[in-house]
Image (tube, rainbow, N blue to C red):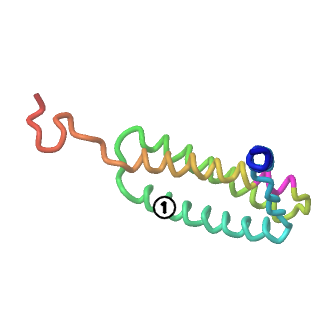
């Protein structure tokens, strides 16, 4: 009888210790250290994205746009120019924190620019909807 109690006590202690280890240990994996080379690569990729967006902007300007879209296109162009300036600063700096900050800002500007371009070039829905009679 005593042996059974001792075995169950040891098992319970091991289960509690194991559970605490799993809960408190958690996910303590090391974050990947971002190097200068990684940031240079991301800067090049972002510059390619900016050039692609400038091409899309030129295509959008070539097509007749609905009223009000020209203001959105102008805003998009201003944001793309800001992003391009940030990328040019990134090419000249060697500070990793500044490069990371500039890249984050540039990516936010690119996201806003894509949204503006999509809004400006998307055809407006019909009043009645597709196939509807309007009333």
Q: Residue 48 appears in which quarter of the rendering?
A: bottom right
In the current view of this chain or complex, which residue is farthest to the top? 135
Q: Tell me the magenta residue range.
A: 97-102
Q: Secondary structure at mark 1?
A: helix
Say if the magenta span includes residue 65.
Answer: no
Quadrant in which the C terminus appears:
top left
Looking at the image, which residue is at 30% across and 42% down? Answer: 124
Residue at coordinates 12% horizontally, 32% vertically from top-left? 134
Q: Nearer the viewer, residue 120 or 134?
A: 134
Which residue carries the number 1 mark? 56
Q: Position of residue 95 (x, y in %)?
A: 91, 58
Seen in the image, is 134 located left or right of residue 37? left
Furthest residue toward left: 133
Q: Is residue 38 left or right of residue 67?
A: right
Considering depth in this image, is 14 or 18 the residue closer to the camera?
14
Q: Position of residue 69 (x, y in %)?
A: 42, 43
From the image, give the main secondary structure of the stretch colored magenta.
helix
Residue at x 34%, y 44% (from the top left corner) = 66
């Amino acid at each position: 009888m005593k042996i059974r109690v001792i075995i169950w006590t040891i098992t319970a202690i091991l289960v509690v210790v194991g559970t605490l280890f799993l809960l408190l240990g958690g996910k303590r994996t090391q974050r990947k250290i971002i190097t200068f080379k990684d940031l240079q690569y991301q800067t090049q990729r972002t510059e390619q994205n900016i050039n692609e967006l400038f091409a899309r902007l030129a295509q959008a300007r070539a097509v007749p746009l609905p009223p009000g879209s020209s203001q959105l296109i102008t805003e998009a162009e201003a944001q793309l120019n800001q992003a391009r300036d940030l990328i040019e600063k990134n090419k000249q700096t060697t500070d990793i924190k500044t490069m990371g900050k500039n890249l984050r800002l540039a990516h936010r500007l690119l996201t806003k620019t894509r949204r503006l371009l999509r809004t400006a070039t998307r055809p407006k829905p019909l009043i009645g909807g597709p196939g509807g009679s309007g009333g």
